[in-house]
Image (cartoon, helix red, strand yellow):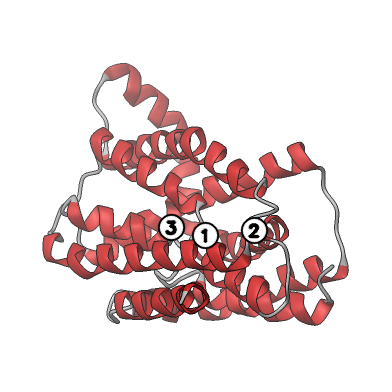
Amino acid sequence: MASFVQGIILGIIQGITEWLPVSSEGINTLIQLHFFDEPLAEAIRMSLWLHTGTLIAAVLYFRRDISDLIRHLPQYTRELKSGQTTERSKLISFLIISTVLTAAIGSPLLLIGLEQEEVPAGIIMAAIGGFLIITGLVQRYAPRFSGTKETTSMKDAVIAGVVQAFAAFPGLSRSGLTISTLFFRGYDPQRAIKISFLMSIPVVLAAEIGLGLIEGVSFDMAAICGLVAAFVFGILTIGALIKLAAKVRFWKFCIVLGILSLLPLLIERL
């Protein structure tokens, strides 16, 4: 069982890395496997739980955007009936479609990960490392395709929702993959980042509710301390790190971390 100090450490890491395209879940899972000797399923559960803290931080940070979309819902239903939709309505449709697809595809993938109790730690770390390298390579080339696209579309929602689902695998960065996908679809960096984080809110909320219904809800000191730390550090860093993520080439970090994660298995096999 995790200690409260362990929970705080993991929460701080979650609060900082959630806003960067580096897979906070993958990094926290690696840390728990390598330094705290936690089994894979428990490491994934804790990593997912910590998203609750940064979810609250994201809701507070984007509260005006969320409030604006909620107030627009009555008009959204009228526009759907008339067939003439504004950009706000298109964004609401985008979020609904992407969330449904992410849940449909990502839920089975997540459950598969939670059932892997007997897989050797070296193989797990190597798999996460491979996913980090994939994340880095995608980010390396995606900015070349960014543009000035302003209008969200159903096609974009489908593509982004499917891609987001694969972030159920630790090591595949949800924000990195979705932002890169939106780059490929022609969105500029600022809009792509905002849409990506708005996409995360209903997905993380649905995941936490789903896991609570399936496995039951239990709280210990480590989980509570981790959630509080993730929220505090998340709300303190979100603004600066989102701006940083648009400027810094984090693909190099992902690839280096991925290679380092592969090394234990490679050394073991030699």
Label 1 belongs to which residue? 170
State the separation of the CA atoms marked 3 and 1. Answer: 10 Å
- Secondary structure beneath dot 1 equals loop
Please tell me which residue is depicted at 64% across the width and 58% down the height of the picture.
44
State the separation of the CA atoms marked 1 and 2. Answer: 8 Å
In the image, residue 163 sits, relative to residue 50, either above or below, namely: above
Query: How far across and how far down the image is residue 147, in percent?
Result: 12, 59
Query: How far across and how far down the image is residue 13, in percent?
Result: 59, 78
State the separation of the CA atoms marked 3 and 2. Answer: 15 Å
Can you tell which quarter of the image residue 137 is in? bottom left
**Quadrant of the drawing holding the N terminus:** bottom right
Can you tell which quarter of the image residue 88 is in? top left
Question: What amino acid is at disc 3?
Answer: Arg
Query: How far across and how far down the image is residue 198, in percent?
Result: 44, 53
Label 2 belongs to which residue? 44
Question: What amino acid is at disc 1?
Answer: Pro
Label 3 belongs to which residue? 174
